[in-house]
Image: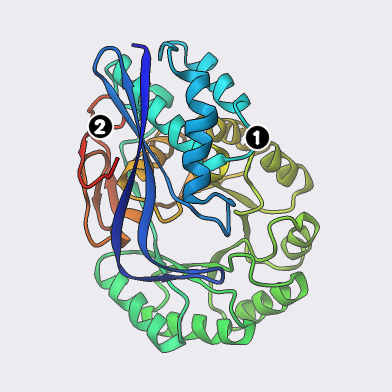
Amino acid sequence: MKIVDIKLGHISIPLKKPFKTALRTVNSVEDVVVKIITDTGHVGYGEAPPTGVITGDTTGAIKGAIEDHIKKHIVGLDIANLEEIMIRLEKSLVKNSSAKAAVDIALYDLFGQLHNAPLYKLLGGYRKEIITDITISVNDPEEMAKDSLEAVNLGYKTLKIKVGKDANLDIKRMEAIRKAVGYNIDLRIDANQGWRPKEAIYTLRKMEDAGLNIEFVEQPVLAHDFEGLKMVTDNVFIPVLADESVFSPRDAIKIMEMRAADLVNIKLMKAGGIHNALKICAAAETYGVECMIGCMLESKISVTAAVHLAAAKSIITKIDLDGPVLCSEDPVEGGAIFDEYKITLTDDPGLGFKDVRGVKY
């Protein structure tokens, strides 16, 4: 099964409601779709979102990286030689993690098809079903409380609350949400780098004193501020999850060695795909640090790949893969089955895709 061509397309999917964080507001998924074609007729699908404020990758950059660099390094190679392909993919150019991730996902899709097995079984096969949280966008406290209740009524037991825009208002947001949903619902908060270290400590201690029972806080400070992240971790009881601080296995190991965070978040678009994400999992197992797996605003293509990784590895104990349920429609036939909070994998080979409608190549 040799690679003969790589085609790039674009997919556009409106969101059910605007997605708002401390960094940006988004109204639709606008992602690059990768289609790798082989000499046997098998096709592998991948996807990359242009998340410039986090990864630095734009639509043009993703397409340029694949067309001008990655493609010439891997076309002609046999899918059976996955390690060689991954080495070439990594060396084709520096950074550009989203472009690499999209190609990596399509390659692993084909690797599963080659062995006629679902990818999660080839990677470890720990479980077949996982439970995800759902994200509540940052808004006024009353609107966030209303959105949280709507999610609970859909069956969600865990909510990830976006904060990081005005620390004092963030406390009021969390008080309103906790009052609305009660104490049988787990609340996680994600500051998306929105606080300074001392501000984060002040805010989190206030939330602790208010008895808000926060499961963990995600990326309270700037991505590059490992020392500030450690300062927060050392001075609050709420566990700290490193997200934007962790792009590579090297980043993850540094965070773990410093004890700068209690948990690490794996995102395929930051790691550059499944190949590097597996290395982060291995490091986390070695250091005894649990992982969450998350996603950007992505369709079911790349999120299905993340589901397979999460299903394969026991070290991934927290799931934040709500991208597809935030979309107003699903153009992907096959892949993981998203029933609100419950995500189930099939036993179809690879990632299990049959077709992707609406892609403009």
On screen, residue 256 versus residue 171, left or right, reads right
The residue shown at (73%, 72%) is 196
Query: In terms of depth relative to the viewer, which is nearer, 133 or 11?
Result: 11
**Which badge, 1 or 2, comes first in the chain's sequence?**
1
Q: Of tags 1 and 2, which is closer to the observer? A: 1
Query: In terms of depth relative to the viewer, which is nearer, 333 or 34?
Result: 34
Give the answer, above or below, for where 90 lies relative to 333: above
Q: Where is the C terminus found, in terms of image quarters?
A: top left
x then y, percent, for residue 61? 53, 45
The residue shown at (44%, 50%) is 49
Give the answer, above or below, for where 293 lies relative to 120: below
Q: CA distance from mark 1 to mark 2?
A: 30 Å
> Looking at the image, do the residues carrying marks 1 and 2 touch, with CB atoms under 8 Å apart?
no
Give the answer, above or below, for where 257 lies relative to 346: below
The residue shown at (53%, 78%) is 212
x then y, percent, for residue 246? 64, 47
Residue 194 has which mark? none
x then y, percent, for residue 231? 79, 63
Q: Where is the N terminus found, in terms of image quarters?
A: top left
Question: SS for tag 2?
Answer: loop
Q: Check disc 1: other Cα within 10 Å, few if <14, some if 14-19, many if 20+.
A: few
Q: Amino acid at mark 1?
A: Val
Give the answer, above or below, for where 121 lies relative to 169: above
Q: Which residue is mark 1?
A: 94
x then y, percent, for residue 12? 30, 55
Q: Which residue is mark 2?
A: 352
